[in-house]
Image: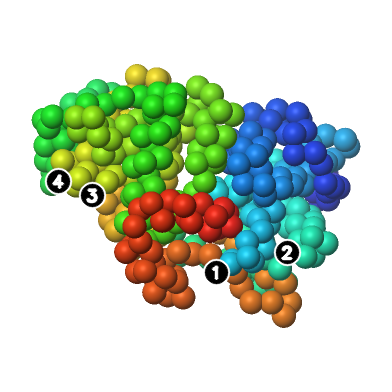
Amino acid sequence: MNAPFFPVTPAVRWADPADRRVDAFLHDQPQATPFHASRWLAAVEAATGHRARLLVAEQGGRLVGVLPLSEIHSPIFGRVLASTGFAVSGGVLVEEGVPAEPLWQAATELATRLSCPSIELRGGAVPPDGLAGWTRRSESHCGFVTALAASDEAQLLAIPRKQRAEVRKGLEGALTVTIGSGPRDRAAHYAVYAESVRNLGTPVFPRALFAAVLDRFGTDADILTVWSGPQPVASVLSLYHRGLVMPYWGGGTRDARPLRANDRMYFELMRHARARGCHGFDFGRSKTGSGAYHFKRNWGFTPEPLVYASWTASGQLARDADPTSDRHRALIAAWQRLPLRVANRVGPWIARGLG
């Protein structure tokens, strides 16, 4: 009779965020995301100054788990260890059968040592409710992923009828499309994205963050821009990961809606991704019930709840950096009225602390 198997608790320690073993470990983990990779941590640190941290779990000297973290400092939103900074996923990643609890525990010890009263885990193996200081939630955000169709016409037919009509109008309009990552692409993307988020009432991320991601991801990232004459009206910076295209930072100007430029943009991205050999489209996360949430459902995507977890030190208030929370409602309304020039000047200083 075989003896029962009890998993060996791994040893957890701090490690150099550039440890080459990490990317080799991620290569073999099906749940790994671009936001676990050292190049994401490095891009965030280079662009914002938020220090990259890394916890690794080892058994017999072999890497069996990782928790990449960004140490976010903000005079407005406070301090937090986020896995990972400016990402929508990440979190604890362990081999099958390896317990995640030592990494959760090590994260709280690291946060205490660094005087960070909060931790945010955006996916991965998350602690259960009731574990000291931890809160788990699955109702706040949803992800949207679907397979790409085999052809343009099949892709159109996969879109529900009402949204398909909008896409066809965008395809028939006098718009042009460019794809690249050079200076012109970057300038057009930032101009469009900055106006888009101002119109939504949120500050724009620093220009350096987009540049750092593009520089470090190389051919695994690009920008697709839709133009009306000489004017960029919709633009998206996308990541490519294991056959998925991930439109990550995208938006449109006020002129985009009547031109159906956003509809054209996402369909063109599907077309471009298929030509690159991608098999799936990851439409990213949206706050449950938001306008973006319903926009993605209109495209035929099925929302899947995302499981996040946060830790708050005893005696501290939970961090609230959600730009859509009731606490920030008045600020959002005021921000929407700011001149774009002012929003673009002040916004990056604020947004770099959102993490």
Q: Which residue is mark 4?
A: 258
Mark 3: give few (<14), some (14-19) or many (20+) Cα within 10 Å.
some
Residue 193: which quarter of the image?
Answer: top left
- Per the image, the residue denoted by label 1 is 320
- For marks 4 and 1, give the CA distance: 35 Å
200 to the left or right of 161: right
- Callout 4 amino acid: Pro
Q: Mark 4 and 3 residues: CB-CB less than 8 Å, in contact?
A: no
For the point 56% across and 28% down, the residue is: 215
Disc 4 versus disc 3: nearer the observer: 3
Q: Work out whether residue 166 can be spotted.
A: yes
Where is residue 158 drawn, in percent x and y?
A: 22, 36
Residue kind at label 3, given as amino acid type: Arg
Which residue position holds label 3?
Answer: 254
Helix, strand or loop at mark 4: helix
* Outermost residue toward the right in this view: 60
